[in-house]
Amino acid sequence: MQKSEKETEDSLNKISELDSILNNLSEYYSKLRNEDISREEIFDSLYLVLKEEKNWEHPLDFWSLTIEYKKALKLLSDFDFKTLKSTIETSGEIIPKDLLMNYKVRIKSKGLIWIIHKYDADPFPSNPHAHLIESGIKLDLSNGNCFNKKELVYTLKEKDLLFIRQKAEEKKFELPKIEI
């Protein structure tokens, strides 16, 4: 079903409003914290904060959000942006390509980027766990199980899990006991 001109215009206006909110939050938190907080980091942080509540499966779901600047500001008031800067990069080949169907456009030349949110409100599947944000995958750091929502979709090879754990430990993350 094709959208009408009005529906298309409304969708574009909504995206423009969200884009403006992301830019304004980036500017606000960069000044407040006296460090560069990028628009992408604001996007990722809002996605992480709202993912479970909104039952989002993919970051593109963010663009359906209706939110006011003040509400977004409040949601991020206690967010630790350092967790977004403490990323672990791995080869893109550790996850089957069919799971990354929508991810291909965001893969950087060096591979996948995992984010560990040290104080994630949701301790599933492990505490802490890693997020592959662009695909909605959560990695259990105790056994390598990968989940989309709460459904097991893949298990990393032991050597790949150990590599991620090693990098996390180098960044001083306390990890769950390994169970492989």
Image: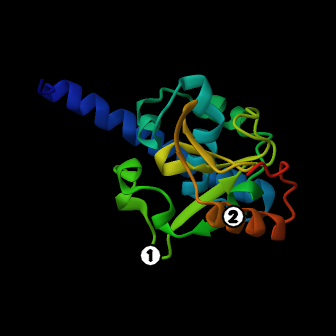
Q: Quadrant of residue 32?
A: bottom right
**Image-based side of 46 in relation to 7, left or right:** right
- Do residues under tags 2 and 1 come within 8 Å of each other at their CB atoms? no
Cα gap from disc 2 to disc 1, whole angstroms:
18 Å
Q: Could you say which is closer to the camera, residue 43 or residue 128?
A: 128
- Look at label 2 and name its amino acid: Ile
Label 1 SS: loop
User: What is the residue that sits farthest to the front in this orientation?
Assistant: 180
Residue 139 position in % (x across, y down): 63, 47
Instruction: Identify the image quadrant of the N terminus.
Output: top left
**Image-based side of 66 in relation to 131, left or right:** left
The relative height of residue 9 versus residue 119 in the rendered view (above or below) is above
Residue 96 position in % (x across, y down): 42, 55
Q: Please name which of the two marks, 2 or 1, marks the residue nearer to the observer.
A: 2
**Point 36% across, 59% down: residue:** 104
Q: Residue 164 shows which numbered tag?
A: 2
Residue 179 position in % (x across, y down): 78, 48
- Look at label 1 and name its amino acid: Ser
State the residue position of label 1: 109
The relative height of residue 180 versus residue 124 in the rendered view (above or below) is below
Q: Could you say which is closer to the camera, residue 33 or residue 3?
A: 3
**Point 55% across, 55% down: residue:** 39
Instruction: Rate crowding at label 1 as few (under 14), some (14 to 19) or many (20 or more) other CA atoms within 10 Å.
Output: few
Disc with the residue nearer the chain's start (2 vs 1): 1
Label 2 SS: helix
Instruction: Rate crowding at label 2 as few (under 14), some (14 to 19) or many (20 or more) other CA atoms within 10 Å.
Output: some
